[in-house]
């Protein structure tokens, strides 16, 4: 079902409709979406176990929601006169700045829990947290939770000032947050500040503001809670571990001796009580998870000490994602048990309160899941095993950038269109693209790539002109964790100020805000909570996203709207590489029964020594081209520029409603098409060809004493590159321009392919390419094969090796059967544990190619030829690179002359192997 606008509710009224996905189809339902989350198994296989997905309602929230609605409709019975005055003030229809329904409902829920008659709350049990009363309000990023904090503070302080003996209320407020940026942002909760929210959002009548200012307020980041211990100091007077009294005197300086404190925890998903973990589980925790546990321990222990010494009336927890995280000791993705109200991201999107994440739902690769949706998984699958990310090592940054450049160029092209639209509209700030990287090395490389103008000129940094900005996470963390009275490095503080003022036109300092003109932000991990730039329009994830919680936290950085005047007009943020399903997900382990398999001994049989096959171990090549080079273009595999491998168009749509499984085009909202046209305009074809030719010439003559020969070789190389582009580059989609080869992945493939194919012109007197043979293992042999396997295997008669192991049972069995029947075949061996490899270059790194079979073939004259046989039903670009490397190996070994005669055969049809082999042998005579 497609609709023109995914916004189906008013932000100022309770939602009356919602999108639901049933049997993969979006259905518009009447009523309000129940609060809850999804229990979803995570499997590594391509098939998602959809039937096991289960919606788990938050029964406590749904019950409270119904009772608060009924209580509201009856006129809030049981509340104090101050509270009634505030509720009426917030609900006035003639308000110039109307409050969102979600803001009013969150405040009403807390008021109901404290002030409603006991009969209203009969049957409800809200679990305490080790004696602490906690109420969690789940509110989507951008839904205005700071305003709700102001409403709660006003309600509590004004009631306490009116009734000092009523212990339900507090006029001492402690606000705890994760970092310095949020602490500074929350200064708007101090009622005497010029820009306070009580006046800005008209939260209290003017005559009540003076009473509100009589309360005691303290806003701090949790780092202040770190206990002091001077028992190991060299001081003459050692006090030892700080007592609770001393702790509260130090921490609650602004609150004085006040008791019965109201605590507000901002971004409260950090403030959980870690559960004990078995030692073996603790050892598997990542450094980030250990750090999170330590932060949570300090935060919650500080609250325990305050509660023991001064008493905490209750804690109000605000978070967009109040779920237990990995490493907490609880099931990852389960909500805090004290969540009492829920207005999540899906509700906020459907009410038009926040931007709509627009994720890839289709592209022209033909893949079931769009490549740029689960980008990191796709990149890791594409990388060779030696470069792939594992639990013990990072993926090679250069390889990640190469595989991600298509997504980066497409998203940057979309950013440029947005940038031009901003300029036409006269926006004082540019749109911002965020790139979230897996590690510092990758972030540095991506920053260098973008800031040097290799993606778009508009994102290029120049002297005194920084528009692409990399966040040094370690330096930022140092600035964010500072507490008052401590010194901070100037560089760290400057970094924080730039980050804090991105998208801002005003700030407390002099001149323009330092981050006003930033256009692209590269960071490691997710940007800190509290980063509330409203001009984020594109987000690219180049990291693993192990949970939907992490996805929502990263995407949340871009969800704040720019326009708060007309909520019926949707705003979008384009998101690539963050597999965001707009749904809270809890992991559920999936058990797989193990079946015992019987192993087979595969070995060289001594009685078949006459069927032995030997081969040279080649580790490289040597040649000395002086003046003339040549290229057999017919034997150079073509390069395929195919949207099936790197999409040239991406269809993005709003991620609205609860969507299970892969993204698709069925959801509500308009479709938009992203392409790379601006990137193509900046990367001229001639310049790309010259870059390729220059690199090839450098590889031919890389020694300084040979540089004089480059001017002789360069014109020849340039001519070869143009011929290759004209005759061997196949563009599958006629709408894709040849400028697409400017992408690093295509440019690198052309360089690597021609490096293998260009050879000295021996007819002009140049010395031939020769192999470099391994010094200590010059020859390999089938006699060395000995291993066990549980894979399927069939016995042989024409092979020195006892069995052929079948990785692809159907076609490999077919090939083995035909090799047994062909009379010209003297012997054959499958290249399994044989260690026959051909060196080749792919994606900027050296690799080893292992062909499928080696064959000894009898010629009509009785002589023998050795055949390297590769079976390929479907060819990738990596396969074509292996083919040209094999042909180079054959040329070099045949020039050497001491290892017999070799030919390389590529068979594309397993059922036509005999005629393929005979044709290749005939042509090679």
Image (cartoon, rainbow, N blue to C red):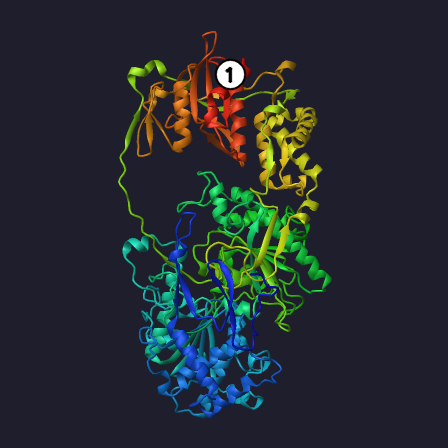
Task: Mark yes or no: residue 17 visible.
Answer: yes
- Compared to 629, does 73 lie above or below? below
Q: How many marks?
A: 1
Task: Measuring from the top left, give residue 864's x and y in whole percent.
Answer: 45, 12
Q: Quadrant of the N terminus?
A: bottom right
Residue 471, located in which quarter of the rendered image? bottom right
The front one of 254 and 661 is 661
Q: Is residue 629 left or right of residue 913?
A: right
Please give left or right for residue 335 compared with residue 652 in the image: left
Report whether 791 appears left or right of 742: left
Position in image of residue 617 (x %, y %):
44, 22
Residue bearing the label numbered 1: 921
- Mark 1 neighbour density, 10 Å: few (under 14) some (14–19) many (20 or more): some
Q: Is residue 491 above or below residue 384?
A: below
Element assignment for label 1: helix
Q: Nearer the viewer, residue 433 or 627?
A: 433
Establish if 330 lies above or below 78.
above
Q: Position of residue 876 (x, y in %)?
A: 53, 35
User: Which residue shows up at 67% across the image and 55% down it?
Assistant: 417
Q: Is residue 299 above or below residue 698?
A: below
Q: Can residue 830 be seen here?
A: no
Q: Quadrant of the C terminus?
A: top right
- Residue 138 location (% of width, % of height): 45, 71
């Amino acid at each position: 079902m497609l609709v023109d606008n995914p916004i189906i509710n008013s932000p100022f009224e309770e939602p009356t409709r919602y999108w639901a996905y049933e049997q993969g189809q979006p259905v518009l339902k009447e009523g309000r979406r129940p609060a809850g989350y999804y229990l979803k198994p995570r499997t590594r296989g391509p098939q998602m176990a959809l039937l096991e997905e289960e919606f788990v309602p938050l029964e406590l929230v749904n019950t409270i929601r119904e009772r608060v609605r009924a209580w509201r409709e009856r006129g809030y019975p049981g509340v104090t006169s101050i509270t009634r005055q505030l509720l009426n003030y917030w609900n006035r229809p003639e308000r110039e700045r109307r409050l969102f329904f979600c803001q009013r409902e969150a405040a009403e829920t807390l008021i109901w829990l404290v002030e409603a008659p006991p009969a209203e709350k009969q049957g409800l049990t809200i679990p305490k947290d080790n004696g602490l009363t906690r109420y969690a309000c789940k509110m989507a990023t951008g839904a205005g939770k700071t305003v709700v904090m102001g409403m709660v503070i006003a309600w509590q302080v004004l009631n306490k000032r009116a009734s000092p003996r009523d212990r339900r209320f507090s006029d001492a407020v402690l606000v705890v947050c994760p970092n310095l940026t949020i602490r500074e942002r929350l200064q708007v909760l101090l009622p005497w500040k010029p820009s306070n929210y009580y006046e800005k959002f008209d939260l209290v009548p003017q005559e009540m503001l003076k009473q509100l200012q009589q309360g005691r307020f303290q806003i701090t980041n949790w780092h202040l809670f770190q206990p002091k211990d001077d028992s190991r100091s060299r001081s003459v007077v050692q006090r030892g571990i700080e007592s609770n009294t001393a702790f509260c005197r130090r921490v609650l300086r602004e609150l004085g001796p006040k008791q019965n404190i109201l605590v507000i925890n901002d971004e409260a998903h950090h403030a959980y009580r870690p559960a004990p973990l078995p030692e073996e589980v603790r050892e598997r925790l990542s450094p980030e998870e250990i750090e999170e546990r330590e932060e949570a321990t300090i935060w919650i222990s500080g609250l325990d000490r305050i509660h023991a010494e001064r008493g905490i009336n209750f804690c109000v927890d605000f978070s967009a994602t109040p779920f237990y995280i990995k490493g907490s000791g609880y099931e990852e993705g389960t909500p805090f048990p004290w969540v009492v109200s829920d207005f999540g991201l899906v509700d906020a999107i459907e009410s038009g309160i926040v931007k709509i994440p627009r994720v890839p739902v289709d592209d022209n690769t033909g893949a079931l899941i769009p490549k740029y949706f689960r980008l990191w998984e796709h990149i890791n699958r594409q990388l060779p095993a030696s470069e792939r990310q594992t639990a013990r090592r990072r993926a090679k940054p250069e390889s990640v950038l190469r595989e991600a450049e298509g997504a980066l160029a497409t998203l940057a092209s979309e950013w440029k269109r947005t940038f031009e639209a901003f300029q036409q509209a006269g926006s004082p700030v540019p749109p911002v693209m965020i790139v979230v990287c897996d590690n510092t090395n990758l972030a540095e490389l991506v920053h260098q790539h973008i800031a040097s103008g290799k993606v778009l000129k508009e994102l290029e940094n120049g002297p005194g002109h920084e528009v692409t900005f990399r966040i040094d996470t370690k330096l930022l963390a140092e600035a964010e964790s500072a507490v008052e009275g401590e010194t901070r490095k100037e560089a760290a503080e400057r970094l924080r100020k730039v980050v804090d003022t991105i998208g801002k036109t005003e700030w407390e300092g002099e001149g323009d805000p330092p981050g006003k003109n930033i256009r692209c932000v590269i960071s490691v991990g997710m940007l800190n909570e509290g980063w509330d730039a409203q001009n984020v329009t594109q987000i690219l994830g180049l990291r693993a996203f192990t949970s939907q919680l992490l996805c929502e936290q990263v995407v949340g950085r871009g969800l704040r709207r720019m326009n708060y005047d007309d909520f019926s007009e949707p705003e979008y943020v384009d998101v690539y590489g963050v597999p965001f399903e707009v749904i809270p997900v809890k992991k559920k382990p999936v058990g797989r029964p193990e079946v015992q398999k019987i192993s087979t001994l595969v070995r060289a049989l001594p009685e078949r020594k006459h069927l032995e096959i030997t081969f040279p171990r080649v580790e490289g090549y040597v040649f000395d081209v002086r003046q003339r080079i040549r290229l057999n273009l017919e034997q150079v595999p073509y390069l395929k520029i195919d949207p099936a491998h790197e999409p040239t168009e991406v269809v993005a749509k709003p991620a609205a409603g609860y969507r299970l499984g892969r993204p698709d085009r069925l959801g509500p909202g308009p479709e938009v098409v992203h392409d790379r046209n601006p990137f193509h305009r900046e990367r001229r074809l001639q310049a790309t060809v010259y870059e390729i030719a220059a690199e090839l010439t450098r590889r031919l003559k890389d020694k300084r004493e040979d540089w004089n020969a480059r001017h002789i070789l360069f014109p020849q190389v340039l001519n070869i590159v143009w011929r290759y582009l004209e005759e061997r580059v196949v563009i599958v989609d006629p709408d894709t321009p040849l400028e697409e080869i400017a992408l690093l992945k295509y440019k690198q493939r052309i360089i690597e392919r021609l490096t293998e194919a260009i050879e000295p012109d021996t007819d002009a007197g140049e010395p031939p390419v020769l192999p470099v043979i391994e010094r200590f293992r010059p020859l390999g042999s089938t006699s060395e094969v000995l291993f066990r396997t549980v894979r399927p295997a069939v016995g042989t008669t024409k092979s020195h090796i006892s069995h052929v192991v079948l990785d692809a049972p159907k076609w490999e069995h077919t090939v083995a059967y035909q090799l047994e029947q062909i009379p010209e075949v003297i012997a054959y061996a499958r290249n399994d544990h044989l260690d026959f490899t051909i060196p080749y270059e792919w994606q900027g790194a050296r690799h080893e190619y292992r062909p499928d079979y080696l064959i000894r073939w009898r010629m009509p004259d009785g002589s023998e030829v050795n055949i390297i046989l590769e079976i390929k039903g479907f060819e990738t670009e990596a396969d074509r690179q292996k083919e040209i490397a094999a042909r180079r190996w054959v040329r070099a070994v045949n020039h050497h002359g001491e290892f017999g005669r070799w030919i390389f055969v590529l068979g594309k049809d397993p059922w036509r192997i005999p005629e393929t082999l005979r044709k290749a042998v005939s042509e090679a005579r």
